[in-house]
Image: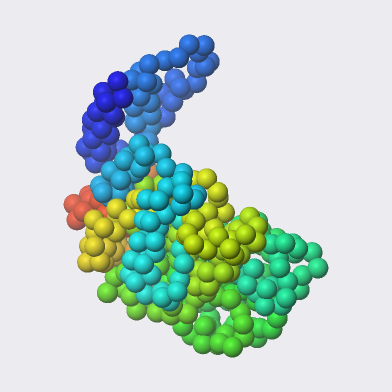
Amino acid sequence: MAEDLLKDVASRATRYLDDVTQRRVFPSPDAVRDLQRFSVQLQDEPLDAAQVLAELDTLGSPATVAGTGGRYFGFVTGGALPAALAANMLAAAWDQNGGLEIQSPVAAHLERVCRDWLVSLLGLHAQTEVGFVTGATMANFTGLASARHAVLHAHGWNVEAQGLFGAAPITVIVGDEVHVSVLKALSMLGLGRERVVRVPVDGQGRMIAARLPAVAGPTIVCLQAGNVNTGAFDPIGEIAARLRGSGAWIHVDGAFGLWAAASPAQRSLASGLDLADSLATDAHKWLNVPYDSGLVFVRDRSALNGAMSASAAYLIEGQTRDPHLFVPEMSRRARAVEVWAALRSLGRRGLGEMIERNCAHAARFARELRNAGHQVLNDVVLNQVLVAFGSPDVTRRVIAAIQQDGTCWCGGTAWQGNIAMRISVSSWATTDADVEQSIAAILRCAERS
Ligand SMILES: *Cc1c(COP(=O)(O)O)cnc(C)c1O
């Protein structure tokens, strides 16, 4: 029974992946309308698992967004590498609780292996610890919780035990182009998303180091490795040098940009990462593992464990590396499995090549759209391209037209007073042919708009 079912799911998944390269990127209006057929009263009697799966595939698969194919350029998503997808399916069969080493020795061990590989690949400080979270939002939350722990601990205050009431105020400094997920994390931590000190940025969205205010008292500085619109990096090394000796905690949001550090050609963008106290990134974006998967890196393990522990007991637990001490969750899936599989299948060279291929494709989008007379609004330093097609209204029409056309999918964004189409190239699956086909479709839509 289970065997037939698993064979059936493997063949349905294979068919889906074959089909996804041919079909429209955004589902057809018919497929979306057919989702109504899921909306039935829950029946009284059990239903055969094979029938449940068939229903899910028949109604669900056509209504998916083809984010795993090579022509999805919306947001910054990434696809799913074959090894990571397969590992995800095996891990589902394992059904491990990744919270405690005694509940899953394999999950805990793979976290250790991934930690060593990632610290080396990204050039982080050797002591850095890692937590496997759901995404960069939770990675920002976890890094900033560690920051809150450390800067108040240095002032003799135990924030986990005593809370924020009565603590010394923490100054939080961000760039004017801070990602909303950092502000959300600050709001959840009681640090307030509106009481931040904003530092002006330049025309690419980079924090201007010379405008950093003088710091005193408990301070957290939030930097960015990879602006979500332009791909630009804050000058991390320069800002860290200005902050040296101040006791300020440096947190870096590198949801996708951090992976530049794994590419010899792009690494110079990311210099200074080893000076950060905490960093957040996604594995489900540029590492191309299935959702959901994010990583938080914290240099001082005691700050991370102190912030994430349910009690002071972590101090004596020490023998094992219990994964729950590194993340907000207790019970959770064994997320390191896919990270391990992605890294193991790519190797150092494969990872670097994937990053560089995506960047080369972004450069090609920019070159050909510019040659056709359209405006590229950013310096294309990484995988992000911002294009305007004339007036904001025309640009909006081109974006709507490309989304309707279905050849590829690009979203819209507001950038420093302009409206732009944003093209993010971050999938392992994107080929030269995908880029050619997509450029042709965009030019076609622009001509008609
Ligand atoms: C995507 C993104 C985030 C949020 O990541 P999630 O995985 O959606 O939680 C944070 N910062 C930047 C720069 C991003 O691009």
225 lies above or below 326: below
**Left-right relation of 346 to 29:** left
Question: Can I make out residue 376 in this image?
Answer: no
x 81%, y 68%: residue: 166
- Whole-percent x, y for residue 317 in the image: 55, 60
* Residue sitting farthest toward the top: 45
For the residue pair 171 and 152, the one nearer the viewer reads as 152
For the residue pair 314 and 446, the one nearer the viewer reads as 314
100 lies above or below 354: above
x 45%, y 71%: residue: 128
x 27%, y 63%: residue: 351
Q: How is the image coloured?
A: rainbow
User: Quadrant of residue 121 in the image?
Assistant: bottom left
- Whole-percent x, y for residue 108 in the image: 42, 54
x 42%, y 15%: residue: 47
For the residue pair 196 and 377, the one nearer the viewer reads as 196
